[in-house]
Each structure stands twice: as C-alpha cells, then as structure tokens.
Image: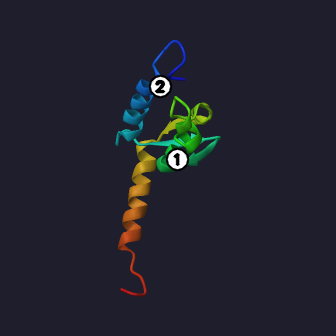
Amino acid sequence: MLIAPPYGMNSASAQLLLALLIGLKTPPRRIMQNGQLVSMSEWIKFAFSETARSIANFVDVSVLKNAQLVFLGEQSVDRWRKALQDWELEKTTIN
C-alpha cells in the first residue's frame, strides 16, 4: 500500500501518484476489484465514495486493498481496436 511503510507517502501524495498511473494512455491497463474487471470511472466512484470523503484520507483504503492494476498485452488491445473498427464499418438495415 502506498501510504504504508516502506513507501511512507502521505495520503495526498499517494493519490497524486495513483492519478498519474491511472491517467496514462500507455501501456493499456484495467483495474480488477475483488477479482472482477471494472471500468476506471466505476473504480474511482468506489475509491472516492462519500464515506471516504468524510474522513481525512479522502480515499477508501478497503477499496485500495482489494484492487489490482492489470496491464493488457498489445494483442488484446489490437483485437479490441479491430473489433470496434469492424463494428463501425458494419452495414445496418438503416444504411
């Protein structure tokens, strides 16, 4: 955990580091929460919930403990890009 030894960051510094890591475009990544893939926006809602904001840390430590950052391989990203491009090019009954 970022705020525990040996890192020893204060809560605000740890949150800045998380924001930088999550906000980067490359390498592609996803977050697993309790063993299930969740979107970044959904995870942020969990991590920075109302209860977390009501305490001094602003981040829910229990959410951080159960979260994993998973890096995606280039093949999986390329497959998704191709699938989305194919979907956009697909003719519909309207066209």
**Figure coloring:** rainbow
Which quadrant of the rendered structure holds the C terminus? bottom left
The secondary element bearing badge 2 is classed as: helix
Q: Which residue, as the protein is rendered here, is positioned at the far bottom?
A: 94
Graded by Cα atoms within 10 Å as few (under 14), some (14 to 19) or many (20 or more), the crowding at tag 1 reads: few
Amino acid type for the residue under numbered disc 1:
Lys
**Residue 61: percent from left, percent from top:** 58, 31
Between 51 and 44, the residue placed more toward the observer is 51
Which quadrant of the rendered structure holds the N terminus? top right
Task: Quote the CA–CA distance across marks 1 and 2.
Answer: 17 Å
Q: Tell me the quarter of the picture where residue 67 sits.
A: top right
Q: Tell me the quarter of the picture where residue 84 sits.
A: bottom left
Please tell me which residue is depicted at 38% across the width and 38% down the height of the picture. Answer: 27
**Residue 69, placed above or below residue 45:** above
**Residue 33: percent from left, percent from top:** 60, 41
**Residue 41, placed above or below residue 18:** below
Instruction: Kindly identify which numbered label has been placed on residue 11.
Output: 2
Q: Which residue, as the protein is rendered here, is positioned at the far right?
A: 34
Amino acid type for the residue under numbered disc 2:
Ser
Q: Which residue, as the protein is rendered here, is positioned at the far front?
A: 54
Between 28 and 78, the residue placed more toward the observer is 28
Q: Which residue, as the protein is rendered here, is positioned at the far top?
A: 6
Please tell me which residue is depicted at 39% across the width and 87% down the height of the picture. Answer: 94
Does the CB distance between marks 1 and 2 fall below 8 Å?
no
Of label 1 and label 2, which has the lower sequence position?
A: 2
Please tell me which residue is depicted at 51% across the width and 21% down the height of the picture. Answer: 3
Circle 1 residue: 45
The secondary element bearing badge 1 is classed as: helix
Q: Tell me the quarter of the picture where residue 74 sits.
A: top left
Graded by Cα atoms within 10 Å as few (under 14), some (14 to 19) or many (20 or more), the crowding at tag 2 reads: some
In the visual, does 62 lie left or right of 24?
Answer: right
